[in-house]
Image (cartoon, rainbow, N blue to C red):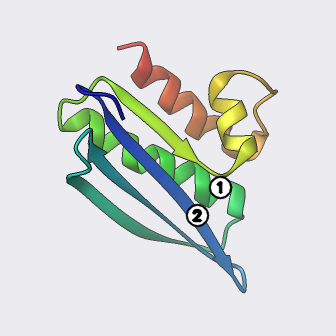
Amino acid sequence: PPPGFVKLNFDGSLINSSAAGGFIIRDWTGRLIKAGATYYGDTSILVAEARALRDGLRLALQAGFTNIIIEGDNKIVIQALKGMIHVPWQISNIIEDIHTWQTH
């Protein structure tokens, strides 16, 4: 990311109906700031991806970062976050949480 920004990468995983997600936050020099992973249990890949984003963003904001670049490979989550598509009901509460944090 550019100087003064951090980058949040997130991803989800699904194997045999067991979902997990994780994130990594790095500063503009590539230095690791925070990382995390969580087991989400029996859920969809869409929910796992969205929860991983929410988990990472929550930690970035709690650490005091406001200039955050978000990167993930799930097109639906990214487009829902940007308001480019109707938010699927499965992740509507998660996206709503994120939008609430962005306005404060």
Rendered residue at 32%/24% (across/down) = 67
The reply to whether discs 1 and 2 touch (Cβ–Cβ < 8 Å) is: yes
Residue 2 on image: x %, y %: 33, 28
Q: Is residue 34 left or right of residue 39?
A: left
Say which residue label 1 marks: 47
Q: Relative to residue 50, is residue 22 depicted above or below?
A: below
Give the quadrant of residue 41: bottom right
Rendered residue at 38%/48% (across/down) = 56
Q: Relative to residue 69, is residue 42 depicted above or below?
A: below
Q: Is residue 79 left or right of residue 32?
A: right
Look at the image and tell me in which quarter the C terminus lies: top left
- Compare residues 55 and 90 and report the one nearer the observer: 55
Numbered disc in front, either 1 or 2? 2
Q: Secondary structure at mark 1?
A: helix
Say which residue label 2 marks: 12
Q: Relative to residue 14, is residue 77 depicted above or below?
A: above
Residue 88 on image: x %, y %: 79, 39
